[in-house]
Amino acid sequence: MGKIIIFLGPPGAGKGTQSERLIKDYGFIQLSTGDILREAVKNGTELGKKAKQYMDAGQLVPDDIIIGIIKDKLDELKDENIIFDGFPRTIPQAEAFDEMLAKEGKEVDKVILFDVDDEEVVNRLSGRRIDPKTGKTYHIIYNPPPPEIEVIQRDDDKEDVIRKRLEVYHTQTKPLVDYYKKRGKLVVVNANNPPDDVYNQIKEVL
Ligand code: ADP
Ligand code: AMP
């Protein structure tokens, strides 16, 4: 493994959008637990069957399942620079991750906190659309898809589930801010700004 970067922040903060840019411009690899879970749900695997009920309700999938996914993935990865997008999301996940990395003589390099207001998150997620063929993310107002592309909306991007996911972020994931601050890993970017500005802030950090 090369550099290990964590993108921390609420759903809709723009983590996936910024990952797309780093992948394209610098060859980063993105590891999104949300993408892995959605793929499993789509394919109807055992993992997908277990995860679906939690995802539909806007709740977190149990830690042991998520930690198992990451363990498998870490074994496959070699010297790439990796962005962890949406993982870890709880203190137990962060502790398990630190342990896994320590066994390889590695550690997290930087945690980039996407600081964004709740109302902005609701606007972004309710307008988010995905191209199912490429996985590329659009927004009906901020970044409209070209007319020839038939986009879809994620099942959990509905207002009531969005509010639930935000609440889950504040109670279960936000404690990670202190966790990584104490370890000297945390960097904050203002994610309320337009995508180009956020990207410039991230490039300065990396
Ligand atoms: P996350 O991966 O953190 O859940 P996304 O990258 O999918 O968030 O972004 C959520 C929505 O907001 C998408 O529709 C995306 O096009 C839009 N978006 C992302 N970054 C910005 C930004 N800086 N300003 C406005 N809209 C944005
Ligand atoms: P995301 O694509 O990051 O918005 O994640 C979508 C959903 O997948 C979340 O609402 C959770 O139900 C689940 N999920 C993704 N990553 C994790 C994680 N690290 N821990 C627990 N649940 C997760």
Image (cartoon, rainbow, N blue to C red):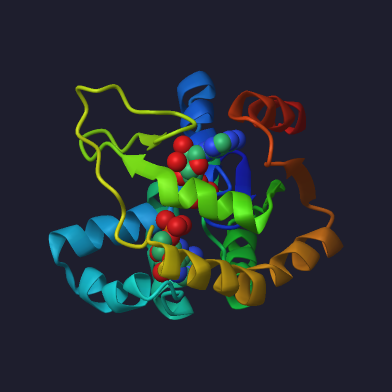
> Which quadrant does ligand 2 occupy?
bottom left
Q: Residue furthest left?
A: 44
Residue 7 vertical position relative to residue 67 in the rendered view, above or below: above
Residue sitting at x 78%, y 46%? 187
Q: Quadrant of residue 144?
A: top left
Residue sitting at x 49%, y 31%? 142
**Residue 17 x %, y %:** 49, 36
Q: In the rendered picture of this protein, how many numbered marks are placed on residues?
A: 0
Q: Left or right of 158: which side holds 41?
A: left
Q: Quadrant of the C terminus?
A: top right
Between 178 and 9, the one nearer to me in the picture: 9
**Residue 98 x %, y %:** 64, 65
Q: Quadrant of residue 68?
A: bottom left
Q: Left or right of 168: which side holds 135?
A: left
Judge whether residue 8 can be spotted in this image.
Answer: no
Judge whether residue 7 can be spotted in this image.
Answer: yes
Residue sitting at x 55%, y 42%? 14
Between 99 and 195, the one nearer to me in the picture: 195
**Residue 89 x %, y %:** 57, 67
Q: Left or right of 203: which side holds 25?
A: left
**Residue 85 x %, y %:** 52, 50
Residue 16 vertical position relative to residue 63 in the rendered view, above or below: above
Q: Quadrant of the N terminus?
A: top right
Q: Quadrant of residue 2?
A: top right
